[in-house]
Image (spheres, rainbow, N blue to C red):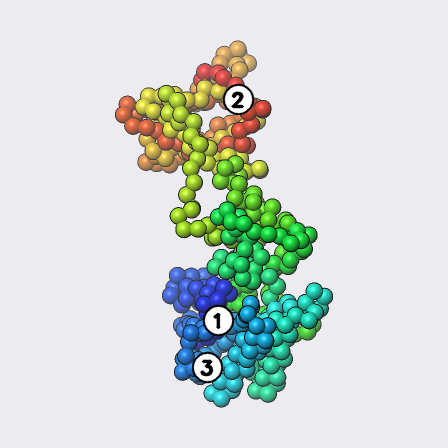
Amino acid sequence: MKVLVTGAKGFVGRNLCESLKSIRDGKDRREHYQSLLPLTVYEYDRDGTQEELSLYCAEADFVFNLAGVNRPEDPADFMAGNFGFASELLGMLERHGNRCPVMLASSAQASLVGRYAGSAYGESKRAGEQLFREYSARTGAPVHIYRFPNVYGKWCRPNYNSAVATFCDAIANGREFHVDDPSVELELLYIDDLVSCMLELLLGNVRRDGAGVCHAGPTDRATLGGIVSMLESFRDSRSDLSVPDQADGSFSKKLHATFLSYYDAGSLAYPLRTNRDGRGSFTEFLRTPDRGQVSINVSKPGVTKGSHWHHTKWEKFLVVSGEALIRLRRVGVDAEGSPYPVEEYRVSGAEPTVVEMAPGMTHSITNLSDTDDLVTVMWANEPFDPERPDTYYEEV
C-alpha cells in the first residue's frame, strides 16, 4: 500500500508517519498490521514541491490530509491554508484520475455550535468538509471526515494550539503560564489513540456518527484546573517518589506520558535521597498509593540487615549483585513451646530469585562476601509510614 500524508511534519502527521514507517520497516511486527505490507509512505509538507505532490497524488492508494493552518497572523489565512490546500490536493487527485480513499482532518470547531459559533477556523474547516463531500459525490472516491477535539501528546507544540502542550512545557521546566478560567472543560483525544484510529481506517475499520463524521476516540474530559493540578503532581513525583495512576487507558497514564516528553534536554535525571550508615545504604526509589514501595538496599561485606518482622507489611527481596543468605523464622513458639525452625535461602545476582518476607516472620539478609557489596531490590506492599512503621525487632 502507498500512503500519502500531507502535513507530515506537523504534530499529528509526525506521529502517524513514525507509526507507518515502523510498520513499513518491520519494527512494528504486530500481526494486525501485516496486511498493509509492502508499505510506502509519502511525506508531504509545506516545503514540498508541486512536482512531488503530483507524483504522490498519482501513485497513492490512500491519502491522509492532515495539512492545515491553526494560528495564522491574518484570520483570512484560515481559509487559504485549510480550504485552499484541500482544494489543490483534491484537484490534483482528480486530474490523475486517482479515486483512492481520502481522509480529512477537520475539527470539532467545524460544528460552529456553542462557543465555536463564528469561529474563522471552524468556518474554514466546515468549508473543507463540504469540499470533500462534493468531491466524493463527483468522483465516487471514498471520503472520511474526522472532527478532532483537543488532541494532545508527544511532539505537540507548546504556546501554539494545545493548552495541554503549553501547560506541560511550562510546568516541567519551571516556565510561567496562565489559566484564564480553570473551570473550562475540554474534550481531549490522546495522539496514540488517534493514530490507532487512523491505522484502523487503513484496514477498513471505521465508525461514523449519524452525520457521517468518523469517530476518533476514546476521548476524556477534564477542566483546565484539573489538568494543571495533575501536571503539578507529576512534577512533584520526583521529590515525593509517587507514581501516578497507570491503569490501562486512563487519562492519568496518557497525560503523564505526555508530560514526560516535554522536559528540556538534559533534564531527565534527578537525584534520590540515600540513607547511609556503617552497614551500607538504603534508597527509596518509587512510592505508589496502592502498589507499595520500591527501594534499593546496599549491604557492605559481612553485614546483616533486618532482624525484624511485620504484622501486615510484606516484602519481596531480589538480589541483583552479590551473594546473600536470607533467613526467616515464624515469630513465637510451636505447640511444644519450641521456637519455629529457621528457613534459609542462599541467593545471588547470578541467578535472580525472589524471596518473600511473609507477615509474622522475622527475617534478615546477610552479605556473604568478604570483599564486595550486596545490592538488593526490595519491594514492600505499602510505603513506609513513620507514624505506623509496623516493624518490630527480633533476631532470627
Q: Nearer the viewer, residue 99 or 169?
A: 169
Q: Which residue occupies the extreme top position in the image?
A: 337
Left or right: residue 78 compared with residue 42? right
Residue 118 sits in quarter: bottom right
Q: Which-is-in-front pick, marks 2 and 3? A: 3
Can residue 307 be seen here? The reply is: yes
Q: Which-is-in-front pick, marks 1 and 2? A: 1
Can residue 33 be seen here? The reply is: no
Residue 83 lies, with reference to residue 242, above or below; the image says below
Q: Which residue is mark 3?
A: 57
Q: Which residue occupies the extreme left position in the image?
A: 371
Q: Quadrant of the C terminus?
A: top left
Q: Which of the marked residues, 1 or 3, is nearer the chain's N terminus?
A: 1
Q: Which residue is mark 2?
A: 391
Q: Nearer the viewer, residue 73 or 272?
A: 73
Q: Which residue is mark 1?
A: 7
Q: How many marks?
A: 3
Q: What amino acid is found at the position of numbered circle 3 in the picture?
A: Cys
Q: What amino acid is found at the position of numbered circle 2 in the picture?
A: Thr
